[in-house]
Amino acid sequence: MRIEEFVLRLQMGGDQGGSVTLIGSAYGNREETFALSRLLQDLDLPIRDLEPVLRSGHPAGARRNLGSGAEPSFLAPEEIGTTLFQALLPGTIRDAFLQSLARVEQEPDAGLRIRLVLDPRSPGMSEIAALPWELLCRPDTGDFIARNPLTPFVRHLEVPRLCAPVQLTDSLKVLVASVLPDDLDPLDVESERKDLASGWRGTSGIAMEFLENPTLPQLRQKLLTDTFHAFHFIGHGHFDPISGEGALLFRDGQGSSLPVRGRVLAEALKSQRTLRLVSLNACDTARLPRRGGLDPFSGVASALVMAGLPAVVAMQHPISDEAALVFSQSFYTALAAGLPVDAAAAEARLTIHLAFPDTWEWITPALFMSVPDGRVLLPATDAAEPTTAGGAAPRPAESVKAETVGAPGGITIGGVGHAIQGGVHLSRGSDEKP
């Protein structure tokens, strides 16, 4: 799949309080202003009440967060999405977007990546970065942009990091850690393990290893014993709106929940040079503080991005076990089929919508992508590698460096259009048989 870029930057300032600049498209660059203060005022209450709307109509089940929401507001998610679309794509920028979309729609296997560039360290940007931009909805057609694999939506938080893709020499190694404290709601971990395995079934060069209820030091020790390219966490998350701190919930010595802040988790992961993907299947791990004056990188996913992790998948809201399992299976299946990471995330969102059409849980998974083209892993290029469909040998991998950026919306793995082929190896730890 060939993906064209449509890059937008949101900034504070201007006569109306904010501006959006088109900084990359096939139809040139341009800038428009929008009423920032009015946007925040109109969406404040509906967004705070969005969590119960996401839950409406879904069967009761365990959810990967700690709290409950208030009553839903009168503003439907479609209306929130339309309001966000009109703010992000005003005037001439909307014209360029429609032209760009028409351009790729005329070509087979082409898509348009909408990349939203944010610098949450700028004064007043925390509230803007925390808006649910994944709900972008075209008012003329009713289409949700982020739910279409041909129009993947990616948020980029600008951070001062450089990143190059890692060359795979044999298999893609994934460490899957499940943590279930005794004092929290149970989760269907066994089903998720099976879904992760079935998502890669029929492909080769993928090795998964499971780790049950590790402490953070044990997780760190496991990462030091082998080379891992991806880390997948199954468990509970927590976000404190007062402090703006996000955390994963590990276990203490008695089996009760022990919050591990995003910054602390980042310290355990960031020195692993081959680690290129972190997937957090835990609620509220993509949330950013909405209050001014708080550290915009105090959430779990944003802390990992600031630490230099090039790709993070996280959850913006509570998510049911059922939806989490559907997302994981669809996402990994799409990646194994060779879809770009952002397109795979959009495909997985669509699958949630098709499985549970009466809910809004499809907007919950968020993508933090630290490289513009998603090239965080390069496939092995030895002579034994199968040729492409056209019969030609794969092109040698090229080293790529880019500024790291990222934020809520999907995932990054395998690069753009690279397929990984072959079987799955599963084990529960070094002392147990596969």
Image (cartoon, rainbow, N blue to C red):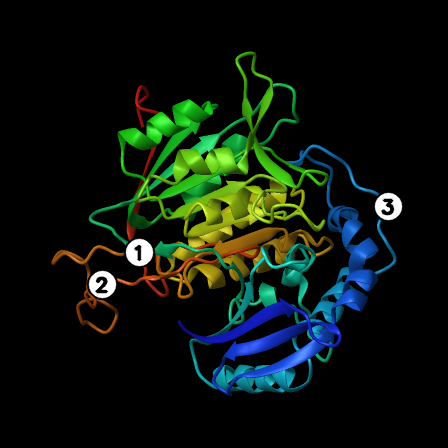
Q: CA distance from mark 3 to mark 2?
A: 52 Å
- Counting residues from the start of the chain, the first of labels 2 and 1 encountered is 1
Q: Position of residue 296 (x, y in %)?
A: 60, 49
The image quadrant of residue 241 is: top right
Write the residue at 63% across / 54% down: 362
Q: CA distance from mark 3 to mark 1?
A: 45 Å
Left-right relation of 261 to 74: left
- Counting residues from the start of the chain, the first of labels 3 and 2 encountered is 3
The answer to whether 113 is drawn above or below residue 185 in the figure is below
Left-right relation of 61 to 324: right
Q: Looking at this view, is 397 or 10 the one in front?
A: 10
The image quadrant of residue 118 is: bottom right
Quadrant that contains the N terminus: bottom left
Q: Which residue in the structure is indicated by mark 3?
A: 71
Q: Position of residue 173 (x, y in %)?
A: 31, 41
Amino acid type, residue under disc 2 in the picture = Ala
Amino acid type, residue under disc 1 in the picture = Pro
Q: Looking at this view, is 61 or 282 the one in front?
A: 282
Q: Which residue in the structure is indicated by mark 1?
A: 165
Write the residue at 42% across / 76% down: 109
Write the residue at 48% across / 23% down: 213
Q: Is residue 131 visible?
A: yes
Q: Is residue 329 visible?
A: no
Q: Which residue in the structure is indicated by mark 2?
A: 397
Q: Looking at this view, is 338 or 81 the one in front?
A: 81
- Counting residues from the start of the chain, the first of labels 3 and 1 encountered is 3
Q: Give the structural element (helix, strand or loop) at label 3.
A: loop
Kindly indicate whether the residue at mark 1 contacts the one at mark 3 (C-beta within 8 angstroms): no
Disc 3 crowd, CA 10 A, few/some/many (<14, 14-19, 20+): few
Disc 1 crowd, CA 10 A, few/some/many (<14, 14-19, 20+): many
Q: CA distance from mark 2 to mark 1?
A: 10 Å
